[in-house]
Image: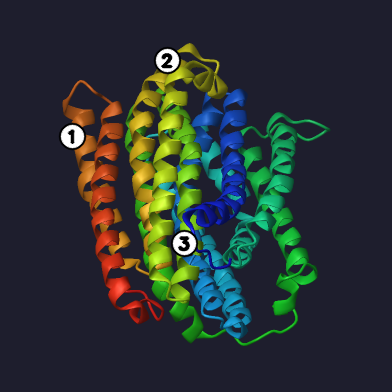
Amino acid sequence: MFPTDTLKDKSKLFLQILIPILITQLGMYSMNFFDTVMAGKAGANDLAGVAIGSSLWVPIFTGINGVLLALSPIVAQLVGSNKKENIPSAVRQGIYLSIVLAIIVFIIGYFLLDPILMSMSLDSNVSYIAKYYLVALSTGIIPLFMYNAVRCFFDALGQTRITMFITLIALPVNILFNYVLIFGKWGFPPLGGIGAGLASSLTYWISFVISLLILSKVRPFSLYEIHKHLEIPSLLAWWEQLKIGVPIGFAIFFEVSIFAAVTLFMSTYSTFTIAAHQAAINFASFLYMIPLSISMALTIAIGFEVGARRMKDAKQYSYLGISIAVAMSVICGAAIYIFDDPVANLYSSNPEVINMTKHFLFYAIFFQLSDAFGAPIQGALRGYKDVNITLLMAFISYWIIGLPSGYVLATFTFLGPAGYWVGLITGLAVGAIALLTRLVRLQKQSLNHPQLFTTEAKE
């Protein structure tokens, strides 16, 4: 990161940060995408099992990853304020915290996975695949969370091409592992959907090892000597990160877990309905990587400018990012409308699943348009370390507005299962409007009192 004076220079720098993040996010999500698509080719039960397993895992992963994302604005503001000597300790403590969080998730999953699956009205084969998909995947959660902490450090320095490089290595490896383990190639038994979980775990380990090598061998990261010095875990340092990270994590958890909740509600429908819904939401979530990447780039750019107290520049970045997200959303919406049939055929060869997937994809057009407004605004607010309002609005828009209205529409109107999609779209739109209001107010405050935005997250 470096200061810029003109909108043209800001646009150029922002794209230099954004494009590698976007490629990284698309690559990372492609692992889940290919898990779902390749499991679907193994059978409807495998697709439904991976769908249920992913619906339980993704909210947990994204929520914990949200906690770790606190490192990005912390490091970005340290860089902007020229306090680079504090960065190594912050990163080490972030890595320690990631290990502790991974262990906690593993323990909770050990005790709660069976009761959760037993409470659902699932076919025994689907339940079995869902359980052992998650068991196989859990063997890689510690390196996954550690990698994400290191990744936040890389990205906060503006070196987003590094994580892009790691992802571009990991993605074909993941596809290869999926091919071998799902379908039973090269002497391995065909594991179906369970093989997708094991393939993801192996890929997490490879990504983590590569990131450690880069951290210790490649400049400018090696200059911070994070790998050379051990220090005692600090509860105070963890608390400083958690004050920012927990609201981020819960906001993301509330957002992503709503999709898990909808999938669980849809377990009362047929296996074909579950599979079609998961296929559509999987593709919509794939497109969500665009506004999410813009959100992450905004956190880095705005955090850097706020750290240097250049509040006008921070404001310019925020609206630049939102404009790009909306433009991309319009393009993606048109692509969904035109190519709904080829997209549906990616996930299944069953005619009923294909037709239902195309039906759900129509709603996905409006779904991702709402995301294009909301996600970048959240990233901008995080750059200011303003995270609590995002948490509150995520809870209200999804759980107070989105899910209840979706249930009513699905149960008592002609929309059926599509009613849940309409409810989610409504919740997203309300949340985006509220957060935009917050951002405008915050920017006015920052221009008058810039010193208030470089210490801690605001209420």
Residue 300: give x, y in percent of width and height.
Answer: 51, 63
User: Is 53 left, or right, of 243 in this rendering?
Assistant: right
Q: In this view, does 37 lie to the left or right of 215?
A: left
Type of amino acid under label 3: Thr
Q: Position of residue 60 (x, y in %)?
A: 46, 55
Q: Which of marks 2 and 3 is nearer the N terminus?
A: 3
Seen at 77% across and 71% down, the residue is 216
The residue drawn where x is 54% and y is 56% is 9
Residue for badge 2: 355
Earlier in the chain: of badge 1 and badge 3, it is 3
The residue that disc 1 covers is 408
Q: What residue type is labelled 2?
A: Asn
Q: Which of 147 and 52 is in front in this view?
A: 147
Quadrant in the picture for the C terminus: bottom left
Q: Name the residue carrying label 3.
A: 299
Q: What kind of residue is marked 1?
A: Val
